[in-house]
Amino acid sequence: MSEDTGEQRREDTATREEKARRKAMLIRAGIYIFATHLFAGFVLLLFALGGRK
């Protein structure tokens, strides 16, 4: 019975670690997407200001 409990704990730990990795990946992807859009907006602003007469 103790073997089943130990194996279950390992599965629970693995599941928690996988969820934590997935959450970290989603946060990182969100930051990358936000930063990319911010940079693209800055480039567009430079073009808009450069095109003025």
Image (cartoon, grey):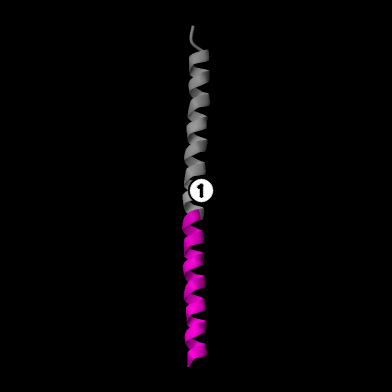
Using the image, determine if residue 52 lies above or below residue 18.
above
Judge by depth and name the residue closer to the eye, 14 or 40.
14
Which residue is at 53% across, 25% downward? Answer: 43
Using the image, determine if residue 44 lies above or below residue 23.
above
Number of residues whose C-alpha sits closer than 10 Å to that of mark 1, classed few (under 14), some (14–19) or many (20 or more): few
Which residue is at 49% across, 18% downward? Answer: 48
Which residue is at 52% across, 71% downward? Answer: 14
The question of residue 6 being in magenta is answered with yes
Judge by depth and name the residue closer to the eye, 17 or 41.
17
Main SS of the magenta segment?
Answer: helix
Q: Which residue is mark 1?
A: 29
- Return the residue found at the far top: 53
Residue 35 horizontal/vertical position (percent): 50, 37
Using the image, determine if residue 51 lies above or below residue 23.
above
Residue 44 horizontal/vertical position (percent): 50, 24
Residue 38 horizontal/vertical position (percent): 48, 33
* Local secondary structure at mark 1: helix
Which residue is at 46% across, 68% downward? Answer: 16
- Return the residue found at the far bottom: 1
Q: How many marks?
A: 1
The type of residue carrying mark 1 is: Ala
Which portion, as a residue range, is magenta? Answer: 1-24
